[in-house]
Amino acid sequence: MAIQEYKFLTPEQRTHFLEHGWIRIPKAVPDDIIRQFTENVWVRLGYDPNNKSTWTKEKIHMPRHREIPTPDFMPKAWGAMCELLGGEDRIDTTLFESCGDSLIVNLGSEEWRGIAPKDLGNWHIDGDWFRHFLDSGDQGLQVLVLYNEIKPQAGGTYIAPDGIKNVVQWLYEHPEGVDTLPQDPDGSRSICSIQSCSDFVELTGEAGDVILIHPLMPHSASKNHLRIPRFITNPPVTLKGPLNLNRANLADYSLVELKILQTLGTSSLPDWKIERERIRFTPRTRAGKDAMILEELERMKAHALKTGGTVDSMHMNGPVAYQVVVR
């Protein structure tokens, strides 16, 4: 069903998304949820927030212990997500249906000074759990939730809006799809062709901001020069099926679909078809997350014994596996 009336996205936001591939929803997550999901982060990490010598890792992808359904976690952003994707009826609400405290931490390092965005070396698009095609709906959007204020040079995610054309063109020319995205010598994914890009945006903002990004946007973690702890999450949103790049009615296209078509300079792709089956697989990071869950639980239990508190975690009886549905 096409969207008859936009209730969350302004005309300016819709135009910005089609031109640049991303928009910001300010203060989309309530303050009490931000506090709830960050209150024990230093206990879980096992670091002293006031002693940088204890920060032995620069970046940590923490597992999830608590979660809230996405529409309740960020109502305004959820509405915007639905409108970017063509309506809530196109979203698979049975898979990745919630947001949680799986914080992505960037603590920086004393050695980082003056690295240009093009040279960050880890440019990529998301999705390590499915075969990528131009029309894949498995990663409907790239969603960034800011859990604290992120200043310039303090580890904000970088995006390359003019790199979308590289990714779109590569996937258009490879209808056989790709399981593991090929890599350039500089560590970036060659699907992004990042060395040809010139438009780089550092995503800074306030706690509670949510940034919604086209799924084919090249992006990279940046270096936290200021060493101000940075906490974000990137909960995925998945569609019930693939994108439709050959709709009979132009008004039925989602903004995500339109961005792909406009990048290719066309209004439809009637002759483009995938040449292999769609598959999903267990993310490569799954085993490492299970080990981190157990480590964090031990720290949380020790802290609870010391302070008389409690441990709030879905993993109290062992790591909960998230099932990836293959279709």
Image (cartoon, grey):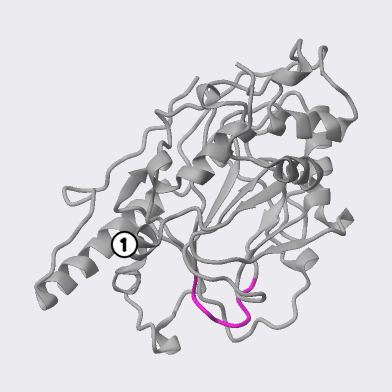
Tell me if I can see residue 193 in this picture.
no
For the record, the magenta segment spans 223-230
Residue occupying image coordinates x 74% and y 45%: 12
Quadrant assignment for the N terminus:
top right
Residue occupying image coordinates x 66% and y 23%: 243
Q: Nearer the viewer, residue 21 or 33?
A: 33
Which element carries disc 1, helix, strand or loop?
Answer: helix
User: Which residue is identified by label 1?
Assistant: 36
Place of residue 170 in the rendered image (x, y in percent of width and height, measured from the top left) = 81, 36
Q: Nearer the viewer, residue 43 or 67?
A: 67
Amino acid at dot 1: Gln
Place of residue 142 in the rendered image (x, y in percent of width and height, measured from the top left) = 60, 45
Q: Is residue 204 magenta?
A: no
Place of residue 97 in the rendered image (x, y in percent of width and height, measured from the top left) = 41, 36
In the figure, residue 132 lies in which quadrant?
Answer: top right
In the figure, residue 109 lies in which quadrant?
Answer: bottom right
Q: Is residue 64 left or right of residue 212?
A: left
Residue 71 higher or lower than 278, as above or below: below
